[in-house]
Amino acid sequence: MRLVVRSFKLTPFEEETDVLKIRLYAQSDEQWREMEVDVNTRESNGGRLLEKMLEVAGNQLVTWLAREGEAGCYRFVNAEAPGVSITLGEGSVEGVETLLALKPSHLIRVRLVRFEEPEKYHVVYEFKPSRESMVYEGFITVKNPELRYDLILVDTAEDTRIILPHEMVLPQLKLGEKRTRRTKRRRKTKSSKAGKRKKSKSKSGKKRKSRRRRR
């Protein structure tokens, strides 16, 4: 089985207008190579192929970290086979407030939208990058506090992402707090069920005693 392995680097930069400021990324150090892997997809039902692709992409990232390991950027590795594609990323960037794209994507434009009616809206402001740029984790800061808008549309080559005003800054610990709350609720539900069963047994025992006394 032949794999196509592609790696690239994302370096952050910022663009600013009179209306907004946005975090963008410049793509560089793009490398391509093909490699053969000993995988029989018919025998493994595709599972072995996925494991091998993850191994190849992971090894590429480890090699990059050992060789460079520089902070302030991202490195992504994509392993692709017929009908299957896997992407892994590593790195850290400061000043991240929200997710502008689920994966690194080429930015076309950013639109600030205001609704006049439920199915009618108009664009109050449109931003286009001055050069070829990518979006991923970053931020959008609307500088004019008097500018009224209901949502932001981030148009990329992949799709369009909708960002609501309250999603402009996402708390980093929010996901962890939700997980602990869910586990606690599950434990309470189990204990409450056991308590209900014990109560029903004690009630039935009282009824039997009362019947014996009547006799």
Image (cartoon, rainbow, N blue to C red):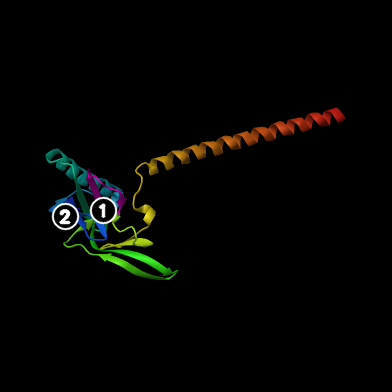
* Foreground pick, 37 / 209: 209
State which quadrant residue 68 falls in: top left
Residue 211 screen position, x and y as percent: 82, 31
User: Viewed as shown, does residue 196 lie left or right of 137?
Assistant: right
- Residue 133 appears in the figure: yes
Q: Residues within 10 Å of mark 1 (few under 14, many from 20)?
A: many
Report the residue that reaches farthest toward the right.
215
Q: Is residue 149 above or below residue 56?
A: below
Image location (x, y in percent) of residue 188: 54, 37
At 14% from the left and 38% from the top, the residue drawn is 66
User: Is 208 left, or right, of 44 in this rendering?
Assistant: right
Q: What's the residue type where badge 2 is placed?
A: Gln
Asked if the magenta segment contains residue 98, the reply would be yes
Q: Secondary structure at mark 1?
A: loop
Residue for badge 2: 27
| Residue at point 37%, 56% (across, down) | 165
Residue 40 visible? The answer is: no
Task: Say which element carries label 2.
Answer: strand
Q: Main secondary structure of the magenta part?
A: strand
Q: Is residue 164 left or right of residue 129?
A: right
Q: Residue furthest front?
A: 146
Tell me, yes or no, whether the highlighted magenta stretch contains residue 38: no
Tell me what residue is drawn at x 36 percent, y 61 percent.
151
> Magenta stretch?
85-99
User: Label 2, label 1: how many angstroms apart (C-alpha)?
Assistant: 12 Å
Horizontal and vertical percent position of residue 152:
33, 61
Question: Percent from the top left, x then y, of residue 179?
Answer: 42, 41
Camera-side residue: 90 or 150? 150
Q: Which residue is mark 1?
A: 136
